[in-house]
Structure formats: C-alpha cells, structure tokens
C-alpha cells in the first residue's frame, strides 16, 4: 500500500512530512477516506523532534505541565516535547521540578490504567495528553477520564493529526488537521456511504499502522 502514498509537509516545518493514502479504511470508531502513516514521524528522531517543536509553539509559560501522557506509542515525541517545554520555561509544580513522560497500560477490559508505581507521575499533576492521531475524539475521552480518576488536571491535548479541535472542553492542538488532507472524510461506522455503495474496506488502521483486508 505505501508505494501509493502522497507526502504532505507540515505547514510550519517542511522537514516533518505526513504520508497519506486515499481509500476506504476502518478505525475503531469510524471509517475514513485517508490513511495517515505516522510510524516514521513518531519513531525517527529528527522528525519526532520536529513534531515536538511544532507542538511546543502552542503552549505558553502560563500553561502548567508536570506530566506528558503518551498514547499510540508517542514516547519519543513526548520526550522531545518535554525538552522543548522545559526550554520554553513552561511551569511544572511537582516535587522534582521536571516533566515526567509516561504512557498508560491498556487493560484487558479496554480501559487505560496506571500501575501503582507510576501513579506518582499522574496523581494531582497537571497533565498534557499526547496522541498519534485523533479522528472522533473517543480515545481522548477515555484517556482523559483515566487521568482524572487519579486526580490529574488536564492542561490540554495534542497530536500529530487531529480531525477534532476540542473534546469535552479540552482544546486539541495538532501538526496536521483534516483540512490539510485532500478530500478527507470521516463517517460513523454504521453511516458510511462507501459501505452503502459497496466499496470494500482496504485496511483496518490505527496509530500503529494498518492491516490490509484485500
């Protein structure tokens, strides 16, 4: 599939490039018309650092961040983002005056959890949520509910790609938005016009990659 991709550079940094493939793709919560390949962006250091620099531009010194919680395998970007926010003087109020970078565990029930030894990075902290991609915002809702259960205050959410700007009053910052992707559409699972027209699904996709069905 990836031989058919198109490259879209980030509006403010042409070294950060998103690869997209048009088609009919199924996520956990929707069907979409473009697959965004972000695996390279979030694992190759120079691109991950570029993403972090772009995201950090949106947070001022008045935004407190004690912890960055990374979903979708975004720990490399999260580490660079912590570095950029620290250089920018973003406030942190935890005992060690530094920014923690952590990731939730996904329980067998599908819920996000933090083991007892990692709860110190979340409990009563100011938390920034970091994602690979957001299409409907449901993953953000789930993770936000999780960290709030541990007493965290959410300072915001950010992603490489997001089709949503706000979820449950949490602002979402992203390097790429839906309007940056040519002909991008997202449909509820049971209201997809492509399915109704008999167009087969090309692949099941998420922030980690894709599994072809044909």
Image (tube, rainbow, N blue to C red):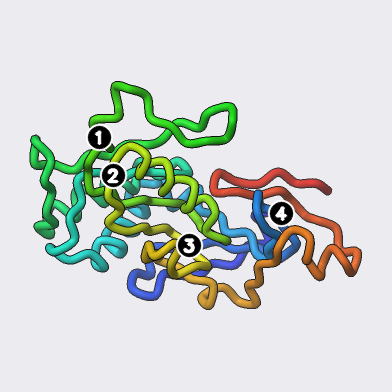
Is mark 3 in CB contact (under 8 Å) with mark 2? no
Upstream in sequence: badge 2 or badge 1:
1
Name the mark on residue 121: 1
Q: What residue sits right under mark 3 in the picture? A: 161
Closest to the camera, between mark 1 and mark 4, is 1
User: Which quadrant of the figure has residue 100?
Assistant: top left
Residue at 66% x, 67% y is: 186
Q: Residue at x 65, y 64 (%)?
A: 34
**Which callout, 2 or 1, points to the residue nearer the camera?**
2
Whether tag 3 and tag 4 are in contact, CB under 8 A, the answer is no
Report the residue marked by disc 4.
26
Furthest residue toward top:
117
Estimate the spatial distance between the alpha carbons at disc 2 and disc 4, rounded to whole Å.
32 Å
Earlier sequence position, callout 2 versus callout 4:
4
Residue 161 location (% of width, % of height): 48, 62
Q: Earlier in the sequence, mark 3 or mark 2?
A: 2
Spatial CA span between label 3 and label 4: 16 Å
CB atoms of marks 3 and 1 within 8 Å:
no
Up the image or down, 139 lies above or below 7; here it is above
What residue is shown at x 27% (from left), y 56% (from top)?
155
Image position of 12 with respect to 95: above or below: below
Secondary structure at numbered mark 2: loop
Residue bearing mark 2: 152
Comparing 53 with 152, the one in front is 152
**Residue 14 at what x, y percent from top left?**
38, 70
């Amino acid at each position: 599939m990836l031989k058919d991709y198109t490259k879209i550079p980030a509006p403010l940094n042409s070294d950060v490039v998103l690869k997209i493939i048009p088609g009919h793709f199924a996520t956990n919560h929707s069907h979409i018309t473009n697959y965004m390949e972000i695996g390279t962006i979030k694992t190759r250091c120079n691109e991950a650092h570029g993403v972090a620099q772009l995201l950090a531009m949106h947070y001022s010194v008045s935004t407190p961040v004690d912890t960055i919680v990374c979903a979708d395998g975004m720990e490399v970007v999260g580490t660079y983002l912590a570095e950029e926010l620290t250089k920018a003087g973003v406030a942190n109020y935890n005992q060690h005056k530094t920014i923690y970078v952590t990731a939730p565990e996904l329980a067998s029930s599908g819920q996000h959890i933090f083991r007892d030894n990692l709860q110190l990075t979340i409990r009563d902290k100011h938390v920034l949520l970091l994602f690979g991609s957001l299409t409907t915002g449901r993953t953000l809702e789930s993770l936000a509910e999780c960290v709030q259960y541990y007493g965290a205050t959410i300072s915001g959410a950010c992603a490489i790609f997001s089709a949503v700007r706000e979820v449950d009053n949490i602002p979402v910052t992203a390097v790429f938005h839906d309007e940056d992707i040519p002909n991008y559409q997202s449909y509820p699972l049971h209201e997809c016009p492509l399915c109704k027209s008999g167009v087969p699904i090309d692949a099941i996709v998420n922030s980690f990659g894709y599994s072809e069905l044909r």
